Image (cartoon, rainbow, N blue to C red):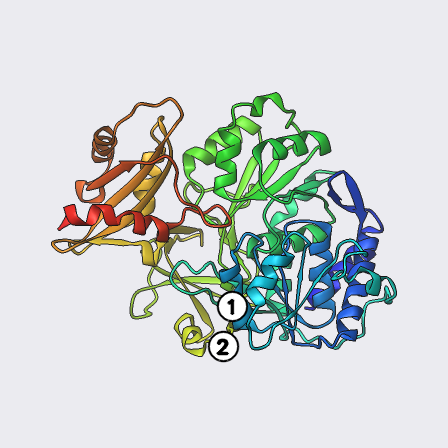
Amino acid sequence: MNLSKIWRENVDEYGEYPILIYEGEEYTNVRLDEASSQLAHTLRYMGVEKGDRVVVTMPNCPEVVIAFGGVIKNGSAVVPVMPLLQAQELRYILEDCTPKVVLTTNMLFSKVQEASTGLSSPPKIFTLEEPEYENSLQKTMQKASTETPDVNIHEEDLAALLYTAGTTGAPKGVSLSHKNLYSNAVAASKKAEILKLKTGRVSLSILPFSHAFGYTMMNVAFMLGDKNVLLPHFEPVKVLEAIETYKVTHSAMVPAMFHALYHHPDAHNYDTSTFFACISGSAALPKPLAEGFQKKFGCIIMEGYGLSEAAPIVTATDPRKKIKSGSVGQPLPGIEVAIVDESGRRLPANEVGELIVSGPNVLKGYHGKPEETGKVLKDGWLYTGDMAKIDEENYVFIVDRKKDVIIRGGFNIYPKDLEELLLSHSEVSEVGVIGVPSEKMGEEVGAYVVKKRGSDIGEEELIAFSQEHLAKYKTPRFLKIAGYLPKNVIGKTDKKKLREWAKEFQTASN
């Protein structure tokens, strides 16, 4: 299970074909394979050795694919970093993983320099863009061999450090081996084999490759032999134009992207008839949104569940099998799941507890954090921190994040239940539910709601609506109409920021 072989396996199985389309230009798989090998030789010439870390911070573009390939082929560990991070956030990662090199773009170069200033071991910074640029590696790469370097890579060797979003504290570097990432891509590609029912498959790559979900979906696309249209960032109009222009057949997205496309007023003006399948992950996809999107675009949605620590995909739905409402499907091949209580005791079917995962995809540990590693890795099982239940047919139902569960007067309240209810209201666009500290009850329920355009619904009306459908203790003590919900870099609602907002409620709750 050597991740560096994905590029050569793609060429051997599918022959030469245009694997990427970026800004109207096509790039063949052979061209990318050779360029990534040239980069690997160049890194080795510069003294970057097996096991060294190389940070890659770029938007989706051909260069980021070449960068990933070159680092992996060299036997080094790639550290994908979101290009949207601020300099101080990037600095933390550079301090933590001490890379020898950072590969970036001309546009981001000054930010990387700022983040590196004053570090005890500052990395060398390069781009893969125009050869005339003084920090470009292009001229050196052009002189290097196009053959894959002869590096002895073992499946347990470190392949990547993926930094978590830091929603519960400082980001942690998730150490993933070649086995972790390769096995997960293989298992995910087996789940996604329904995509092979379409000839001339064209994938739209919107998810940033620097994110765990996007990185694995890139590997899956290579394994399936897809042509990939790259977009550097998400814009609904650009997505709709790409679907129409390139006859896109499928894409992987996060719920915020589904939401934006579904509600775009001009979506009906584009020919999306070739678009037949979507993969949803990274956050829960509300049922009303899933149903509305599938009806509007005439496609199927395969929803999955995962986390960076599991490389990252754990479960996925399969349209060829039974689809159960509210479920994120069954585990990928080779992965086991179970539910435990606070003491680690296994729970029977349909009881809610913490989801634990075992398989070849489970992380090696957190970089430089043995105590944190010990909290999540126990007897070969990954403790996910997600509350879930598993039915008799091994279908997984995510209830909520363990840290997001609201405990009001001793009763557990799962924000997801209230969020889905409020989202079912015809005048509601987005919802975020959090716990508000309360001296009397421990916590109270707080909610922020974004109305649909033109709606004049009020806060009291929404509270009354929730009380009609849920036990009163599960409904909001506080609800506020907001113009927007804060999002993190991949489009998830930022609950950490919402909790900061909710300080406005705390005086009234005590």
Q: To which quarter of the image does residue 25 belong?
A: top right
Name the spot of residue 240 as percent of width and height, x first: 62, 31
The amino acid sitting under disc 2 is: Gly
Could you tell me which residue is drawn at 33 percent across and 62 percent down? 347
Q: Nearer the viewer, residue 53 or 293?
A: 53
Q: Which residue is mark 1?
A: 173
Q: To which quarter of the image does residue 46 belong?
A: bottom right
Q: Is 142 rendered above or below residue 436? A: below
Could you tell me which residue is drawn at 74 percent across and 62 percent down? 135
Choose the circle earlier in sequence order: 1 or 2: 1
Name the spot of residue 339 as percent of width and height, x first: 37, 61
In the image, taking residue 4 as reference, residue 474 lies left or right, namely: left
Q: Is 4 rendered above or below residue 280? A: below
State the SS at label 1.
strand
Name the spot of residue 307 as percent of width and height, x first: 49, 58
Q: Nearer the viewer, residue 155 or 239?
A: 239
Callout 1–callout 2 Cβ contact below 8 Å = yes
Name the spot of residue 334 as percent of width and height, x first: 56, 63
> Label 2 neighbourhood size at 10 Å, few (<14), some (14-19), many (20+)?
some
Could you tell me which residue is drawn at 65 percent across and 47 percent down? 193
Q: Nearer the viewer, residue 10 or 492?
A: 492
> Label 1 neighbourhood size at 10 Å, few (<14), some (14-19), many (20+)?
many
In the image, taking residue 183 as reference, residue 455 lies left or right, namely: left
Q: Which mark is residue 368?
A: 2
Question: Distance of mark 1 from mark 2, alpha carbons?
Answer: 8 Å
Could you tell me which residue is drawn at 75 percent across and 70 percent down? 43
State the SS at label 2.
loop
